[in-house]
Image (cartoon, rainbow, N blue to C red):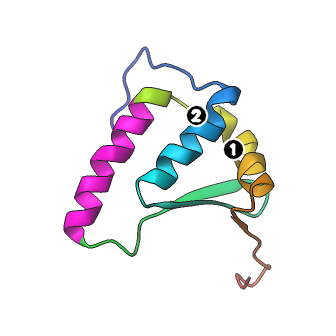
Amino acid sequence: MAQSINRRLMKVGEIPAFVEEVIGTGCNICAVGHDKYVVGDADLSKAEYEKIRRELEKIEDAYGERDFLKLEIVRYLRSIGRYLDVNADGSE
């Protein structure tokens, strides 16, 4: 996804709304462990993916840069039960 030079920064208080909007697209957003999160779209057909990709881009544009909030997003996802813990061998 393209980034503009003067990009808006997401605020901590926007995390719940951001997560709800991503969930609303049909993508499964969840924390993985305590320091990562993913937006799952692997089960989508090519046509569904293209539609949802555009929706996710709109969400990203609306909320702005969020990389610096990764750990806060992970904490929020864990607090609402949207997480996977994986063992060193990759199993749940």
Q: Which residue is mark 1?
A: 73
Q: Which mark is residue 66?
A: 2
In which quarter of the view is residue 6 placed? top left
Q: Which segment is the magenta one?
A: 46-61
Looking at the image, tell me whether mark 1 or mark 2 is earlier in sequence order.
2
x and y, in percent, of residue 28 in the image: 52, 63
Residue 14 image point, x, y percent: 62, 30
Q: Is residue 25 above or below residue 44?
A: above
Q: Is residue 38 magenta?
A: no
Of the pair 25 and 90, the residue shown nearer to us: 25
Q: CA distance from mark 1 to mark 2?
A: 9 Å
Question: Horizontally, is 14 left or right of 81 in the view?
Answer: left
Q: Vertical placement of 88 versus 46: above or below?
A: below
Task: Name the residue located 79 percent from the left edge and 79 percent from the top edge.
Answer: 88
Q: Residue furthest left?
A: 47
Q: Amino acid at mark 2?
A: Arg
Q: Secondary structure at mark 1?
A: helix
Disc 1 vs disc 2: Cβ atoms closer than 8 Å? yes
Q: What kind of element bears circle 2?
A: loop
